[in-house]
Image (cartoon, grey):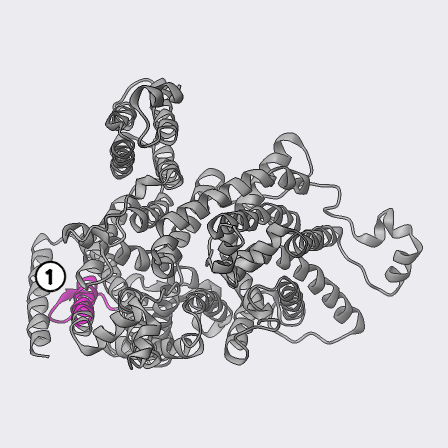
């Protein structure tokens, strides 16, 4: 308990410093983009309390988020002067109750049912809101916000400060859960639910606590959302981005600790803010989806796992199918990005790096380390400015790397293997 | 309608809503059957299945635009490609997750990622415009065609029942697909082995059959059905990459409603959902239809989690 208070204070100080620095830079866009990243930190941390600690996947983050947002819209319609902190509290209560209800209905059954039900929950709530004309229906609802807030200044900065506060609260909650008996119970459920139940862990009760807390924090993140743009419509509040990101961020950062979602959200969140200003905004979601696929296969414990050297000694490149699928899907964003100008293609670097890493891992495994040279050559040809046929050469090099990676087998004598590969 | 007002009941309206629901339900069955195999029998929560169905739609679209062949025929030609895709995905799933017992969290996230990669790739390639195909049976109603001149059909038509061929043809193809799968599963050794893998993998090993191999074949078949389901989808309605998401809830609702691992249950669950959705759309407006699937799902989970025909 005492360590939690200390942690809370440290976080609050760091938050204050971050806010102070942002005020010094004094760039409106910084606050505008920063709000989104902060919002993702809260969402990812909330998702991780259920998904990372107990191992139950929630696909309906957007639903809980939107519940918070629309609760605010509803309250705005009936009693406008409510301050945002009050809206946040109410949003938390409503989303928490819905989380509890969902959990109660589905968590007594197999884990997959909960995941599917959360997916469907998003669809139904969206249908409900779209048909509810009082809340604006499909047309959306406007919220008039003041320009300035006393003591703080511009409203955007006030929202950022609030979100920063939510980040501090969410991180503190996540960390204290992790270090308490509750967290031990959650971990027991994640590792083996049957064994946990048999040794006296009240699994259903713990799972319900997890869904409630997780849902409540997501609702908190959504409550200020209508005030962010001054306008909210079902498609933006229920955007699939929230569901994907709140899963991808903890997965990429690492699910076992509160640090993981934080790292993942800051990394992926800022990455997407960069990608958002390029002409192909859809590439955004593609990149996040791909990073999920790559991460769960290559680095199952996320960045945190890599840092802590808890690398599972799992040779993911040992199976040709895994190599083939990963190699093929990572070429997709490169294909779509290559039509843009070079300055807009910074994100491509990630996927070239993954391709090179894949070829390196596979090459080392089958005893032909030179395989890595092919994607490196392709990357160089793909990135340097030059005639368009360079692209064909790059594509050819990648194809050869894929085919050779599949054709070469570990353990075969050198000359024979090369002869076979033609 | 559409305003949320309740429409007056009339005999014609009810009967036609019922027929439309049955046809829609048969189509839903074709979309669900793949998940019924992967989720119901193999315990693989393939939430990317609807994305593969949309992929099937687009492939049928390209094939029929380029060569002018019938979209459903094109999807049958594409079956081996989808089978291979399914085998590849299962191999990756097995080698990366199932073997390590990590399918609950990471396996689900893997399919979620695949869902996105497929959907966004289609958006980037084709844009978000609705695409549609052309075929002789898209447009006319049953009673106004040559077949409508047969005495039996004329008798049906005279009762005030009519159905668009655009719905009837997919429903018939879906039923044929169902019958073929049912025959395969209950009649062949491989089919029985697939049913057995759901129950006792050790016993299967004792029969000198590798559970992994059987599961790979079964999963590949389940993805292959997405090819046909995709073609049926684009025959029924214009397709746009993100409509696959609407089907996720629907497909799993049907699966749970019918009872996991039961093809008959899936068919009946699909027909039920089709009828209820059709009635909701007719009497309350189509914008409420998506909520029906979820209501069904929650009701089933609360009242009878094993489903109507579950073990």
Q: Is residue B250 left or right of residue A238?
A: right
Q: Residue at x 24, y 47 (%)?
A: A271
Q: Is residue A313 left or right of residue B271?
A: left
Q: Position of residue B207 (x, y in %)?
A: 54, 54
The chain ID associated with circle 1 is A
Q: Position of residue B267 (x, y in %)?
A: 65, 63
Residue A54, quarter of the rendered image: bottom left
Q: Residues within 10 Å of mark 1 (few under 14, many from 20)?
A: some
Q: Position of residue A98 (x, y in %)?
A: 39, 77
> In the rendered structure, which segment of residues is drawn in magenta?
A146-172
Q: Residue at x 25, y 60 (%)?
A: A255
Q: Which residue is denoted by mark 1 in the rendering?
A: A19
Residue A291 sits above or below residue A238 on the image: above
The secondary element bearing badge 1 is classed as helix
Taking depth in this image into account, of A205 and B197 the one nearest to the observer is B197
Residue A76 seen in the current view: no
Q: Quadrant of the N terminus of chain A?
A: bottom left
Taking depth in this image into account, of A219 and A294 the one nearest to the observer is A294
Magenta span main SS: helix
Taking depth in this image into account, of A35 and B162 the one nearest to the observer is B162
Q: Position of residue A381 (x, y in %)?
A: 28, 23
Magenta stretch encompasses residue A157:
yes
Residue B135 sits above or below residue B304 on the image: above
Q: Is residue A232 left or right of residue A373?
A: right
Q: Quadrant of the C terminus of chain A?
A: top left
Q: Residue at x 57, y 54 (%)?
A: B193
Residue A142, quarter of the rendered image: bottom left
């Amino acid at each position: 308990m005492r360590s939690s208070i200390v942690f809370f204070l440290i976080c609050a100080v760091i938050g204050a410093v971050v806010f102070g620095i942002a005020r010094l830079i004094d760039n409106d866009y910084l606050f505008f983009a920063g709000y989104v990243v902060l919002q993702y930190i809260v969402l990812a941390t909330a998702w991780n309390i259920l998904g990372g600690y107990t191992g139950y996947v929630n696909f309906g983050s957007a639903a809980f988020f939107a519940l918070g947002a629309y609760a605010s819209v509803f309250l705005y319609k009936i009693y406008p002067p409510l301050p945002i902190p009050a809206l946040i509290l109410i949003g938390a209560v409503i989303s928490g109750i819905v989380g509890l209800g969902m959990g109660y209905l589905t968590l007594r059954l197999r884990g997959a049912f909960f995941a599917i039900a959360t997916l469907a929950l998003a669809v139904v709530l969206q249908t409900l809101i779209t048909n509810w004309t009082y809340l604006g229906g499909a047309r959306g609802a406007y919220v008039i916000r003041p320009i300035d807030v006393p003591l703080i200044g511009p409203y955007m900065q006030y929202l950022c400060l609030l979100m920063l506060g939510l980040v501090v609260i969410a991180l503190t909650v996540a960390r204290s859960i992790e270090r308490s008996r509750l967290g031990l119970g959650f971990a027991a459920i994640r590792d083996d639910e049957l064994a946990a139940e048999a040794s006296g862990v009240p699994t259903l009760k713990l799972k319900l606590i997890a869904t409630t807390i997780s849902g409540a924090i997501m609702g908190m993140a959504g409550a200020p959302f209508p005030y962010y743009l001054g306008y909210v419509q079902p498609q933006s509040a229920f955007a699939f981005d929230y569901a994907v990101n709140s899963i991808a961020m903890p997965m990429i950062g690492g699910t076992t600790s509160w640090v993981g979602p934080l790292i993942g959200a800051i990394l992926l969140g800022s990455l997407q803010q960069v990608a958002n200003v390029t002409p192909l905004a859809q590439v955004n979601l593609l990149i996040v989806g791909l990073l999920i696929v790559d991460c769960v296969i290559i680095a199952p414990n996320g960045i945190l796992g890599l840092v802590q050297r808890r690398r599972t000694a799992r040779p993911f490149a040992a199976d040709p199918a895994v190599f083939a699928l990963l190699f093929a899907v990572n070429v997709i964003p490169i294909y779509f990005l290559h039509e843009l100008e070079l300055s807009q293609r910074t994100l491509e670097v990630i996927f070239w790096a993954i391709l090179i890493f894949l070829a390196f891992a596979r090459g080392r495994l089958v005893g032909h380390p030179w395989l890595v040279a092919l994607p490196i050559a392709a990357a160089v040809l793909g990135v340097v400015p030059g005639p368009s046929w360079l692209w064909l050469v790059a594509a050819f090099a990648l194809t050869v790397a894929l085919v050779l990676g599949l054709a070469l087998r570990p353990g075969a004598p050198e000359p024979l293997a090369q002869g076979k590969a033609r | 309608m559409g305003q949320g007002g309740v429409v007056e009941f009339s005999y014609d309206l009810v009967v036609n809503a019922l027929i439309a629901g049955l046809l829609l339900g048969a189509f839903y069955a074709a979309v669900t059957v793949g998940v019924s195999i992967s989720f119901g029998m193999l315990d693989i929560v393939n939430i990317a299945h609807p994305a593969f169905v949309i992929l099937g739609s687009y492939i049928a679209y390209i094939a029929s635009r380029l060569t002018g062949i019938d979209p459903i025929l094109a999807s049958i030609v594409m079956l081996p490609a989808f089978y291979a895709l399914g085998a590849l995905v299962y191999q990756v799933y097995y080698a990366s997750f199932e073997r390590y017992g990590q399918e609950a969290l990471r396996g689900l996230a893997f399919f979620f990622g695949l869902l996105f990669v497929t959907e966004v790739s289609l958006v980037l390639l084709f844009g978000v415009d609705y695409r549609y195909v052309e075929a002789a049976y898209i447009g006319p109603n049953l009673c106004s065609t040559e077949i409508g001149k047969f005495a039996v059909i004329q008798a049906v038509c005279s009762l005030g029942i009519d159905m668009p061929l655009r719905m009837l043809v997919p429903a018939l193809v879906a039923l044929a697909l169902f019958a073929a799968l049912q025959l395969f599963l209950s009649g062949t050794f491989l089919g029985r082995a697939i049913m057995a893998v759901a129950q006792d993998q050790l016993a299967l090993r004792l029969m000198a059959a590798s559970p992994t191999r059987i599961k790979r074949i079964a999963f590949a078949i389940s993805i292959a059905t997405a090819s046909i389901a995709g073609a049926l989808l684009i025959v029924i309605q214009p397709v746009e990459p993100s409509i696959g998401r609407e089907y996720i809830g629907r497909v799993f609702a049907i699966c749970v409603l019918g009872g996991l691992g039961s093809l008959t249950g899936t068919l009946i669950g699909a027909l039920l959902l089709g009828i209820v959705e059709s009635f909701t759309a007719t009497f309350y407006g189509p914008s409420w239809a998506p909520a029906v699937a979820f209501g069904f799902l929650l009701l089933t989970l609360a009242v009878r989690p094993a489903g109507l025909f579950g073990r």
